[in-house]
């Protein structure tokens, strides 16, 4: 952490944001793993075929998100590595390039989080409707 104090305020902000996004991806990955397990182990055999199809499609969309998450994580790791090298004076600070990479990562994260929330909401609605129908 001592070396990070050598970063400019903007570069330090990029570093902190990248770490937060990486943490968000890690936690979301835990949720996705849990949701996939719930879908596979507890709902696929219990629901009517049309609900099974919907859950299967949502599971596929979750798989796509996991793939995208790995790609974003790689970009975040590279960004963090570059910022750490910058803090150690091993790299020259190119403010414009850092800003462009951060903007690209921010776009990817916003898009990924939005899609994740949409899918998660759909899963909750499908499962909730199924549970409500079983109480009738």
Image: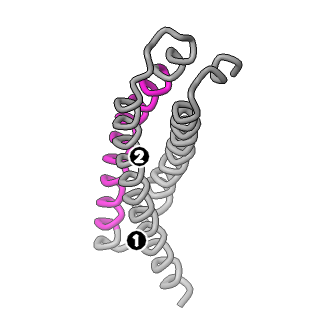
Q: Nearer the viewer, residue 26 or 105?
A: 105
Percent of width and height locating residue 79: 44, 27
Residue 135 coordinates in the image, percent (x, y) = 56, 86
Decide: few, some or many residues near mark 2? Use Cα within 10 Å; few <14, some 14-19, many ≥20: some
Residue 4 vertical position relative to residue 110 in the rendered view, above or below: above
What residue appears at the point 58 percent right and 34 percent down from the top-left corner? 9
Judging depth in this view, the residue of 76 and 119 nearest the camera is: 76
Res. 99 mark: none
Q: State which region is magenta.
A: 52-81
Q: Which residue is mark 2?
A: 106
Task: State the SS at label 2.
Answer: helix
Q: Residue at x 50, y 59 (%)?
A: 42
Which corner quadrant holds the N terminus?
top right
What secondary structure do most residues of the magenta stretch adopt? Answer: helix
Check if residue 59 falls in the magenta segment. Answer: yes
Q: Is residue 18 left or right of residue 62?
A: right
Q: CA distance from mark 1 to mark 2?
A: 38 Å
Residue drawn at x 41%, y 30% is 95
Residue 8 image position (x, y, % from top left): 56, 28
106 relative to 6, above or below: below
Point out residue 68 in the picture as x, y percentages from the top left corner: 34, 42
Quarter holding residue 49: bottom left
Quadrant of the rendered image containing residue 58: bottom left
From the image, tell me which residue sits under label 1: 47
Q: Earlier in the sequence, mark 1 or mark 2?
A: 1
Q: Nearer the viewer, mark 1 or mark 2?
A: 2
- Crowdedness of circle 1 by 10 Å Cα count: few (<14), some, many (20+)? some
Q: Secondary structure at mark 1?
A: loop
Residue ranking furthest to the right: 2
Q: Is residue 92 above or below residue 114?
A: above
């Amino acid at each position: 952490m001592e070396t990070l104090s050598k970063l400019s305020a903007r570069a330090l902000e990029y570093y902190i944001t990248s770490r937060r996004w990486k943490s968000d991806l890690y936690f979301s990955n835990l949720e996705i793993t849990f949701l996939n397990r719930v879908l596979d182990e507890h709902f696929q055999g219990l629901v009517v075929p049309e609900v099974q199809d919907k859950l299967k499609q949502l599971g596929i969309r979750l798989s796509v998100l996991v793939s995208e998450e790995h790609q974003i994580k790689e970009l975040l790791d590279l960004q963090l590595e570059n910022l750490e090298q910058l803090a150690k004076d091993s790299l020259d600070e190119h403010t414009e390039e850092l800003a462009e990479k951060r903007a690209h990562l921010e776009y990817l994260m916003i898009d990924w989080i939005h899609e994740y929330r949409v899918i998660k909401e759909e899963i909750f609605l499908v499962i909730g409707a199924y549970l409500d129908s079983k109480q009738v």
